[in-house]
Image: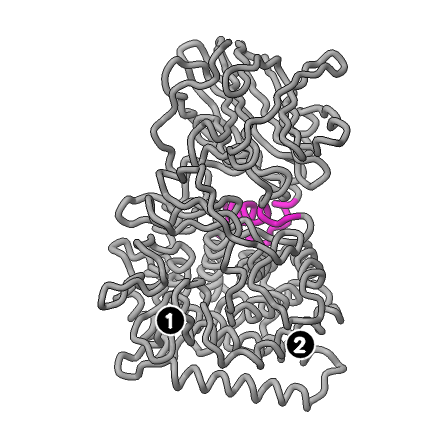
Amino acid sequence: MPTLSAPHRYRALIEDHGLIGSTATGALVRDDGTINWLCLPRFDSPAVFAALLGTEDHGFWRIGPATDGFPLPADRRRYRDGTMVLEHEWDTPGGSVRVVDFMPPGTTTARITRIVEGLTGRVEMTSMFCARPGYGAATPLVTRTERNGAARLCVTVHPDSYWLDGLHHTVAEGGARADFTLTAGESVTFSLTWGLSFKTAPAMRSPRSALTRTAAYWREWASRCTYQGPYREAVLRSALALKSLCHPGGGIVAAPTTSLPEDIGGERNWDYRYTWLRDAALTITTLARLGYTGEAEAWRDWLLGTLGRNAERLQIMYGLGGERDLAERELNHLPGYENSRPVRIGNRAADQLQLDVPGEVADALLAAENAGLLPSRDADAMLRALARWTEDHWQNADEGIWEVRGPRRHFVHSKVMAWVAVDRTITLLRRRPSTTEGELAGWERLRDQIHADVCEKGYDPERNTFTQYYGGRELDASLLLIPQVGFLPPDDKRVIGTIEAIQRELSTEDGFVLRYPTHDESGSNVDGLSGHEGAFVACSFWLADDLAMIGRIQEARELFDRLLSLRNDLGLLAEEWDPRLKRQVGNFPQAFSHLALADTALRLTACDAAYLPSQRTTLYSAPPERESGTRTVAGVQ
């Protein structure tokens, strides 16, 4: 029996991967043509390829030049312009070859298509296919069928089947293998399609027609981006990454992966394949600023279907279908990415109290309406419910934006966002003719009460800085959002003092920003977890935003350029950057990182436009100014 595996590299960096996706799910493709992470049919489905978090015994699919040694990294890779269609090209002594990977968008069919094209000469190629459903835990039944004269390989572990179409694969030890040769102008195609094992086999489709439709879908979507500034390439790639995480049902995942570590070899490994209300709302806010309202409408409908008009049982995250039970467990059969254990699925943070969430949701609803989304009575009812929930809970301690697994505290960011929830509710309700002055007055009193409380208890006058929590001395990068959400103007001395304190105490040598100190002065872990973490990419973009807002525009631009250099060659970012190891860490690609990139680009472009008024409308199609707060949505004070 032929063997399946060839030796593989000891490790692959997180940034060595690219993402292909259908918006219903996604796959990571390593730079040697290996798909080592894939969940079908949804982002949060069990992985059928999980080698990313283990070994090749846990599932992978590699197509590349045949070799007796290590798989060859591609000499070139790129996305086709304005799409999520990924290409890898190899130059070998015999010739050159290209592999085109993509997933047709939508939920009709969960499928990966791979087209292999001979470019020059003659190249011997290999397809190695090892499906291991259940996150690599299951050994499937592999059968072969014939349909219309074509061989199909079917891999089954109930209730799922995976159908591999293309060249004949020989069943080998551990999986299946196909060896073939391509000359210039020749091509072969492969498709992997998911289906329920008790249903009829999925139809075979034309891969080339699917490629044409998929590229057209993405290019049409990309063409609607309203941003035309100097950072368009980076912004558009980030927008495409964000769109890839927007499920057609309206839910939005924070990332398509689980358990890529924030601390290599440590325990800070989390499952991000769910819809955080915060992350989803921030994604919608950014996409609305870029001119996209379709995603906002789908998300609002999803939110209404998940929350309804009652916020009493509010959770901070849900499954893509609105599922509430996201019980966390550990997969002990997986050794983890670079031995970073445990590998977790589910997320216990779903049960936490996080007071900031209604604020991000209300801000997103306002941004979407400013971008052109029509009001909704049901959404207004939900908005009021979230405001009442905020009124009932804002004085409580919580776990905060960073979901600490230590004690609850009165986090300043949480209180600020409680203020935002009420402030944006006032703004939206003031637009409704049916809103009474009495109702508005009540919300305004609550808003003022929260504001005064934060300024009294969350500010350290001796050090001229806001603190992470009431009565504490530690700092937190989320304080950088105080001027961005309009809680205080950027020229307020307390804001400037906070920005400068964070630069002193939370910045790395490269000027990137940590979320918070993971250890207090005694050496104890403040978040209930062992180890350290890298610089948080989104927080570093927030610092660039703040620097621009207080007039240090050149410094902001230099920081932004350094942050852009952290992207991999495909323009993708993980959650964090390890300043010691000089590599990306955390789940990948991360919505938080990409939305923050786009937001900062918008702000810097708007700063340029402030000095060049005649160019403003060509640089950025800005929505109307907010009627409350102290800044415009475009970000120019």
Colour scheme employed for the rendering of this structure: one colour
Mark 2 residue element: helix
Q: Which residue is mark 1?
A: 550
Position of residue 117 relative to residue 310, above or below, is above
Near-viewer residue (407 or 84): 407
Residue 164, image x, y percentages: 63, 23
Can you tell which quarter of the image residue 378 is in? bottom right
Image quadrant where residue 293 sits: bottom right
For label 2, the residue is: 384
- Provide the residue span drawn in magenta: 221-247
Q: CA distance from mark 2 to mark 1?
A: 34 Å
Residue 476 % position (x, y): 36, 68
Give coordinates of residue 583: x percent, y percent: 33, 43
Residue type at mark 1 is Ile
Reply yes or no: does residue 4 show up in magenta: no
Q: What's the residue at 37%, 50% (across, down)? A: 267
**Up-down relation of residue 112 to residue 352 (above or below):** above
- The residue type indicated by label 2 comes to Arg
Upstream in sequence: badge 2 or badge 1: 2
